[in-house]
Image (cartoon, rainbow, N blue to C red):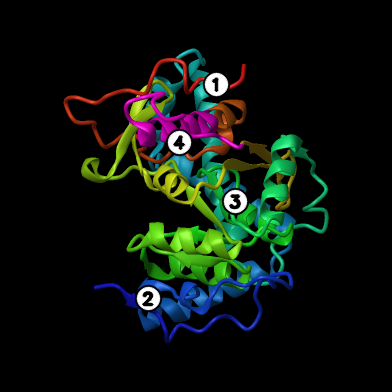
Amino acid sequence: MSAPLSSHPLPSQTNTPPEGKKPPEHLRRIIGSPPGPIVAFLTRGVWALLTALSPSARDALARFVASLAYTLGIRRKVALDNLAQAMPEKSEQERHDIARGAYLTMARVVVESLPSGDRMTPDWDQQGIDGEEAWAALKAHVATGKGALLVTAHFGNWELVGQMLIRWGVPLNALVRPLKGALNTRIAVNRLGAGAGLIYPKGAIQEITDAVNRGESAYMLLDQALPAKSAVFVPFFGRLASTTPAMAVAAERTGVPVFVVMGVRPPGPGARYKLEVEGPILPPQPGECADPITEHTARVTAALERAIRRHPEQWLWLHRRWKVQPPAVVTAPSPGLTEGPK
């Protein structure tokens, strides 16, 4: 059974959050299975090594690990199968290139998310923002004293994008599952060090509701497969994908807007990301469709797909996104409602 890791100390040096609103104490728990003493001892050395490396050295390490994993074929078939079905218009060489980029994205997430200290480059906030109107709308909403619902994907470096948002004055809590192992525990520790709270599945909708009323936004990944009984099925690259309804349920419960936020890495080494923002993505009007929760989930998922199509090498194609099959009868969202802007 999972339990709070109350004995797991925060590191003495963390990614110091800005002064301002902090999540309440009960959202600063790490729930899950901690690593054993031997693994904990060994991984402390790994974290220290990654912390000591320069940004360029971390990037060189990520490139080596990504190339090795791709060459060894670790989940390569999964990535290429996903790409063949999602992007049949691409050539075989293009799909291989995108897959290699996905391996590099994953390796960079790991080596950039685990160090202590400031993990971003000094010019992290000078990369620009695509979707300035959406960003202004998000900031204006947060200025009213209520939080928003922020949706992202396993894209770019979703961990550091959360930290960027906090530094830009958007207090947030990340939706997480109970964690296992040294790597996941370390990432949770660094989330807390960056100033984020952690919301776990049990009672999540009420926690989100309470958080947005305190002025804290909920930050969630919407590209993970769920068991069929817990999911809604929405189009994603032409196939129905099991998706959590939590975002749409929370939007219905709280009435706050939903924004998609993605961090796009420009060329070159170093943890810097250009923010892409889309929203607010509105739920359907009363009577507009038979299943507003599924339809709202589909609209937000369509926004994620648009971002991934623009930068396919920055999404985690190694993930078996479509592994859960829909029931025999699924009511698809209303035609045309998820297409978004051209």
How many residues crowd around disc 4 within 10 Å: few (fewer than 14), some, or many (20 or more)? Answer: many
Q: Amino acid at mark 2?
A: Pro
In the image, 284 versus 173, the foreground residue is 284
* Closer to viewer: mark 2 or mark 3: 2
Q: Amino acid at mark 4?
A: Trp
The numbered mark, 4 or 2, whose residue comes first in the sequence reads 2
In the rendered structure, the answer to whether residue 189 lies left or right of residue 56 reads left
Residue at x 40%, y 76% (from the top left corner): 39
Residue that badge 1 annotates: 94
Measured Cα–Cα span from mark 2 to mark 3: 24 Å
Q: Residue furthest bottom?
A: 7
Check if mark 1's residue and mark 4's residue have beta carbons within 8 Å: no
Measured Cα–Cα span from mark 3 to mark 4: 15 Å
The numbered mark, 3 or 4, whose residue comes first in the sequence reads 3
Q: Amino acid at mark 1?
A: Glu
Residue 328: where, in percent of width, then height? 16, 26
Q: Amino acid at mark 3?
A: Arg
Residue 196: where, in percent of width, then height? 58, 66
Q: Which residues are magenta?
A: 280-305
Measured Cα–Cα span from mark 1 to mark 3: 21 Å
Q: Quadrant of the C terminus?
A: top right
Residue that badge 2 annotates: 34
Secondary structure state at the residue bearing disc 2? loop
Residue 87, can we see it? yes
* Closer to viewer: mark 1 or mark 2: 2
Residue that badge 4 annotates: 317
Residue that badge 3 annotates: 108
Residue at x 56%, y 22% (from the top left corner): 340
Check if mark 2's residue and mark 3's residue have beta carbons within 8 Å: no
How many residues crowd around disc 1 within 10 Å: few (fewer than 14), some, or many (20 or more)? Answer: few
